[in-house]
Image (tube, helix red, strand yellow):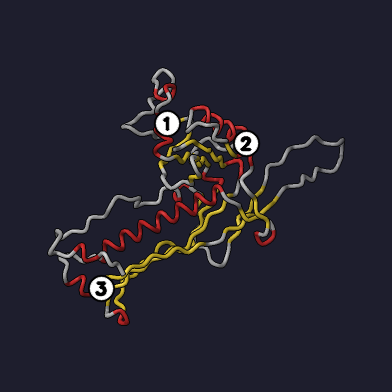
């Protein structure tokens, strides 16, 4: 139960509940390849690597038998829950019911939880092999070292080069960066110069797209000491799975003196399916 609820009593405050600033909507889950309607303890994603054409061995020779690399990644669900109690006496002493407002901040918390699941899956180990017993880490080749700098043009170009070399599709690429790293990028003269960029990258004070990447501001990326870990990826390189989306209930609980209990949960998962389509960019951030 919220023990700060007395701060909203009508004897002290207006008849409205002001929700403090926070991220209300998911920013990353909708950028992934979606797999919905999942049932069971886990789900698999089939992968088929590229092959090469071969020359014939002679007249009337047997046709080639190209060995295709068919592998599997496994995705496991994570359940996230949120709940809060509203005492019946609290509602009587207020001009507005806080239940709906509590439900909104609970919804926001679960939307942010979705983003963390996606972000962790981009950078973490992916379950592979029989029954998902083989962990696959993001390789060094998919990482850009801090180099004593924040997000720079060189780092963006290197990220693009890594994806281009791996023939990652050019459309739909995503670059996830914190506000400080976006500011670092905007401070680079080449990026903001109309002579260098056909269309100004500075649009109403923020970056939309640059170098083929759609930029998404996300403040909850991992930070270790002075290193912020931005990520770039293609939607095909990560699968976001939904066992069930956010479900909410608001009920009275007799054992809590008929207090109102707001409860909601979500069951989702994510797994990286292609390392070449994900790049981790380590940036200096004090």
Q: Between tags 2 and 1, which lies in front?
A: 1
Q: Is residue 248 above or below residue 278?
A: below
Q: Is residue 96 above or below residue 276?
A: below
Badge 2: few (under 14), some or many (20 or more) residues near its Cα, within 10 Å?
Answer: few
Q: Position of residue 258 (x, y in %)?
A: 27, 79
Farthest residue to the top: give it. 195
Q: Look at mark 3 in the image and give the residue it sits on.
A: 87
**Residue 74 located left or right of residue 205:** right
Secondary structure under the numbered disc 3 in the rendered image: loop
Badge 3: few (under 14), some or many (20 or more) residues near its Cα, within 10 Å?
Answer: many
| C-alpha distance separating marks 3 and 2 | 57 Å
Mark toward the start of the polypeptide (3 vs 1): 3
Quick one: 97 or 54, which is closer to the camera?
97
Q: Between tags 3 and 2, which lies in front?
A: 3
Secondary structure under the numbered disc 2 in the rendered image: loop
Badge 1: few (under 14), some or many (20 or more) residues near its Cα, within 10 Å?
Answer: some
Quick one: 2 or 102, which is closer to the camera?
2
Quick one: 285 or 216, which is closer to the camera?
285
Quarter that holds the N terminus: bottom left
Classify residue 286 by image quadrant. top left
What's the residue at 42%, 33% (across, down)? 209
| C-alpha distance separating marks 2 and 1 | 27 Å
Q: Position of residue 76 (x, y in %)?
A: 56, 61
What's the residue at 49%, 27% (across, down)? 153
**Residue 267 located left or right of residue 142:** left
Q: Which mark is residue 184?
A: 1
Q: Position of residue 134 (x, y in %)?
A: 68, 56
Q: Look at mark 2 in the image and give the residue it sits on.
A: 166
| C-alpha distance separating marks 3 and 1 | 48 Å
């Amino acid at each position: 139960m919220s023990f700060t609820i007395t701060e909203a009593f009508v004897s002290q405050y207006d008849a409205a509940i002001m929700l403090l600033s926070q991220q209300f909507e998911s920013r990353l889950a909708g950028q992934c390849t979606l797999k919905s309607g999942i049932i069971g303890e886990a789900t698999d994603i089939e992968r088929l690597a590229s092959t090469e054409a071969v020359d014939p061995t002679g007249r009337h020779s047997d046709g080639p038998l190209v060995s295709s690399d068919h592998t599997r990644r496994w995705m496991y669900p994570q359940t996230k829950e949120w709940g809060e109690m509203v005492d019946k006496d609290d509602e009587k002493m207020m001009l507005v019911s806080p239940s709906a407002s509590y439900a909104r901040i609970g919804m926001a918390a679960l939307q942010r939880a979705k983003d963390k699941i996606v972000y962790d899956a981009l950078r973490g180990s992916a379950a592979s092999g029989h029954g998902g017993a083989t962990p696959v880490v993001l390789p060094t080749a998919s990482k850009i070292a801090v180099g004593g700098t924040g997000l720079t043009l060189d780092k963006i170009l290197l990220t693009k080069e890594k994806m281009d070399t791996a023939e990652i599709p050019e459309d739909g690429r995503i670059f996830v960066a914190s506000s400080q790293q976006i500011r670092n990028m905007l401070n680079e003269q080449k990026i903001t110069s109309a002579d260098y960029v056909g269309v100004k990258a500075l649009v109403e004070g923020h970056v939309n797209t640059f170098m083929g990447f759609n930029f998404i501001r996300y403040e909850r990326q991992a930070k270790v000491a002075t290193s912020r870990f931005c990520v770039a990826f293609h939607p095909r390189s990560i699968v976001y799975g939904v066992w069930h989306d956010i479900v909410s209930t608001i009920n009275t609980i007799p054992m809590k003196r008929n207090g109102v209990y707001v409860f909601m949960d979500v069951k989702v998962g994510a797994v990286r399916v292609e390392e070449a389509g994900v790049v981790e960019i380590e940036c200096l951030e004090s």
